[in-house]
Every structure is written in structure tokens, then in C-alpha cells.
Image (spheres, helix red, strand yellow):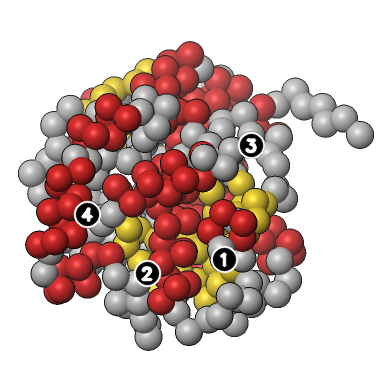
């Protein structure tokens, strides 16, 4: 039967998985969240946040929505705002892809690009400062605050978690990337309540501060933070693994060489999942799943561009990292299982 919609928020593919066994040698089922009109998993959080704020009268017609986003939340909110008739101001930074920036503008959003990171709180800190300034100066601006708004994780508690549980009844390990941690917290809280035997492994980027590791520059939008999100609660997470961005890019390109063009955070999550499984006590029969937040179209000028890759992650720097990093440094960053036993 045909699917017919008149509201762009109404369509979302909920049950598409790629079996990565042939590509990675591991039975890892990758839930694809990029097939909706916003092109990413952030559609779920955007809808839940906007609609719950409307229901509770914290957002009303005539007001302006403002949010800090690395790109995908901005696109999803641009779409929701266009459909519902709100003005939307997105505060992003220089790491936002040109494609995402242009998509937001095409949907009618006002895009502010932060060019200088805060010396302690990074780009996210600088973005949040700009959001505060905008709200202070404009009475009708409403900040949704995806970093602290419980609707962010509730969206995934209500949808992503149950969708995965239903599709994979014998699931043993679930890998979820951590950005605002909305997806991670929603899935982790759902499985803790409904199927506590499922191990929840967070995948983060080296340079992110969410799990207490040191801040460092990051270039790929989506995963990692420079300010710990208010909704993050480590007690729901069984383990975490950090992945260097150069290795995320290698994984993206490996998936693309098999015909699957995914976004950067998917490369991170899949790389982290394979590393974690290889270091774990599980054998090849373990049933695991991971979440792919978006597809690769917006990353053809970055992750999939040789010049960008070579200038951003020079081969010599990667070789030097491998040769010189101390054991302690490697452990603090990208060795699987370092947090095992939580
Ligand atoms: C491409 C991509 N991957 C992962 C994430 C992280 O999702 P969450 O914010 O739910 O942690 C985001 C969030 O914006 C994203 O855009």
C-alpha cells in the first residue's frame, strides 16, 4: 500500500537494518535512521520536544524557536518550524556541513555560525552563550534546550528503544553514539526498564568530555560534546568506547566501498562496536545492533573528500600517534573496555 502524507513529520522508516556480517565479519545489525524528510534520527527528538512544549504551553504560535545544533537537529527543527509556522533560529558552528547549513536556509531558518570556540567550553559553550544572548535580547525567543530537555531522550524511550526490542527479540548488546545523549539515554532507560539483560555500550569520539575524558578538537558533527549534557546519566550505561575520528572516516569509507554511504557518526559507532566486540568475552555468535543516525550525502565535501581528509587527518600525524602515544594515553582514549565493569 502506498504511504501518503501531507505533514513532512509524519513519515519515518522505523524498521530498516543493514546486516554488517559480510562487511565487518561481525553479526552487527545497523538500524538506519536516515530515511525521513529531515534525513536523520534528530527528527524524532525535534518532534517530541516541539510537541511537548506546545502541549505544555511553553511554545505558542508567533514565537521564535532557537536552538544550538551541529546540523541535523537544525534541519529537523527547520522542517518542523516551516510546517508549523514558527520562525526558527539555529546557532551552529564552523563544523556544520555546507549541505546542512544550506538545507536549513532552504527550509526558511535563520542560521548563525559561531566561528570562535570558547577557550574552556569549546564550540558548544560558545554556541550556548550566543543562544543565551539571543533569548535575553528577544522576549519572544524560546530555547528548546535539547541538552537538558527530557523530551529529547523520551522520544527514543517511546520509539527507538521499543522498535529495536521488537525487531531483535534476542538482542544482547546495543551500541549507541553519544552526542546530546538523547538517543543513548532513551534507549538505555528503555532497555533497563524492559529488557535489562541487554548491554548498552555508548560510543563517543576521542576529544569529547561526556564520559570524563579530556577535551580535544573534533571535526565530525554529531557525536561528542565539549559541555556534558544535562540529560546524561552515566548510571544507565554499561560501558563506553572512544573512537578517533580518523578511524571513523576509515570505517565510513569502508562501508561506502560496499555501497553504503553513511554519515560520519555511523562510521564512529560501527568502528567502536567492532573494536568493543573484538575485545569482549562474546564470540562471533553474539547478537548485536547499532544505530546509524544519518546518511552520507551531507559529508561528500568532508569525510568522503580526499583533500579534506588528508589535510584534516594527515597520514604522518596518524602514524606519529600510533608510534608515540603512551600506553596510558591510548587507554584513556581508544582502547575498548577501559570502562568495563561499570
Ligand atoms: C549525525 C548525528 N549522529 C549522532 C548524533 C547524536 O545523537 P544524540 O544527540 O541523540 O546523542 C547526532 C545529533 O545531532 C547527529 O546529528
Is the N terminus in the top left, top right, bottom left or bottom right quadrant? Answer: top right
Tell which circle, 3 or 1, labels the residue nearer the N-terminal end.
Answer: 1
**Going from the N terminus, do you reach mark 3 or mark 4 first?**
3
Query: What distance separates the C-alpha of mark 2 from that of mark 3?
Result: 27 Å
Whole-percent x and y of residue 265?
42, 47
Residue at point 37% right, 85% down?
Answer: 341
Viewer-nearest residue: 331 or 60: 331
Q: Quadrant of the C terminus?
A: bottom left
Q: Residues within 10 Å of mark 4 (few under 14, many from 20)?
A: many
Q: Residue at x 47, y 20 (%)?
A: 103
Helix, strand or loop at disc 2? strand
Q: Mark 3 or mark 2, which is nearer the start of the sequence?
A: 3
Gap between marks 3 and 4, in whole Å? 29 Å
Closer mark to the observer between disc 3 and disc 1: 1
Q: Nearer the viewer, mark 1 or mark 2?
A: 1
| Structural crowding at the residue carrying mark 1, measured as other residues with C-alpha within 10 Å and reported as few (<14), some (14–19) or many (≥20) | many
Task: State the mark number for residue 35.
Answer: 3
Residue 309, compared with residue 226, is above or below; it is above
Which residue bears the numbered disc 4? 207
Q: Residue at x 27, y 27 (%)?
A: 307
Q: Which labelled disc corresponds to residue 26?
A: 1
Alpha-carbon span between mark 1 and mark 2: 19 Å
Query: Which mark is in front, 4 or 1?
Result: 1
Return the residue at label 2: 240
Q: Are marks 3 and 1 in contact (CB under 8 Å)?
A: no
The answer for how far apart the CA atoms under marks 4 and 1 are is: 27 Å
Res 265 label: none
Q: Residues within 10 Å of mark 3 (few under 14, many from 20)?
A: some
Sequence-first disc among 4 and 1: 1
Between marks 3 and 1, how big is the CA–CA gap?
Answer: 24 Å
Amino acid at each position: 500500500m502506498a504511504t501518503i502524507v501531507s505533514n513532512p513529520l509524519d513519515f519515518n522508516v522505523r524498521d530498516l537494518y543493514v546486516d554488517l556480517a559480510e562487511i565487518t565479519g561481525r553479526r552487527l545489525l545497523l538500524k538506519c535512521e536516515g530515511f525521513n524528510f529531515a534525513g536523520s534520527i534528530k527528527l524524532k527528538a525535534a518532534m517530541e520536544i516541539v510537541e511537548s512544549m506546545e502541549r505544555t504551553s511553553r511554545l505558542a504560535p508567533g514565537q521564535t524557536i532557537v536552538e544550538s545544533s551541529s546540523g541535523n537537529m537544525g534541519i529537523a527543527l527547520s522542517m518542523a518550524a516551516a510546517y508549523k509556522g514558527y520562525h526558527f533560529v539555529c546557532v551552529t558552528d564552523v563544523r556544520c556541513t555546507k549541505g546542512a547549513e544550506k538545507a536549513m536556509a532552504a527550509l526558511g531558518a535563520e542560521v548563525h555560525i559561531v566561528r570562535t570556540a570558547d577557550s574552556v567550553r569549546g564550540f558548544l559553550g560558545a554556541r550556548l552563550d550566543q543562544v543565551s544572548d539571543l533569548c535575553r535580547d528577544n522576549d519572544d525567543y524560546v530555547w528548546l534546550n535539547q541538552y537538558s530537555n527530557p523530551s529529547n531522550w523520551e522520544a527514543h524511550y517511546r520509539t527507538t528503544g521499543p522498535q529495536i526490542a521488537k525487531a531483535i527479540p534476542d538482542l544482547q548488546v546495543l551500541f549507541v553514539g553519544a552526542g546530546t545523549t538523547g538517543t543513548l539515554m532513551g534507549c538505555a532507560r528503555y532497555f533497563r526498564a524492559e529488557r535489562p539483560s541487554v548491554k548498552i555500550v555508548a560510543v563517543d569520539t576521542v576529544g569529547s568530555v561526556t564520559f570524563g575524558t579530556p577535551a580535544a578538537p573534533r571535526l565530525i558533527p554529531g557525536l561528542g560534546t565539549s559541555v556534558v549534557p544535562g540529560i546524561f546519566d552515566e548510571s544507565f550505561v554499561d560501558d563506553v568506547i572512544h573512537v578517533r575520528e580518523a578511524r571513523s572516516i576509515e570505517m565510513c569509507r569502508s562501508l561506502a566501498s560496499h555501497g553504503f554511504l553513511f554519515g560520519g557518526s555511523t562510521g564512529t559507532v560501527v568502528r567502536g562496536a567492532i573494536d568493543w566486540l573484538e575485545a569482549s568475552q562474546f564470540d562471533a555468535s553474539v547478537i548485536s545492533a547499532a544505530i546509524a543516525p544519518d546518511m552520507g550525502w551531507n559529508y561528500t565535501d568532508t569525510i568522503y573528500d580526499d583533500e579534506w581528509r588528508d589535510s584534516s587527518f594527515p597520514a604522518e600525524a596518524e602514524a606519529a600517534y600510533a608510534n608515540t602515544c603512551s600506553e596510558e594515553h591510548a587507554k584513556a582514549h581508544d582502547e575498548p573496555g577501559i570502562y568495563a565493569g561499570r
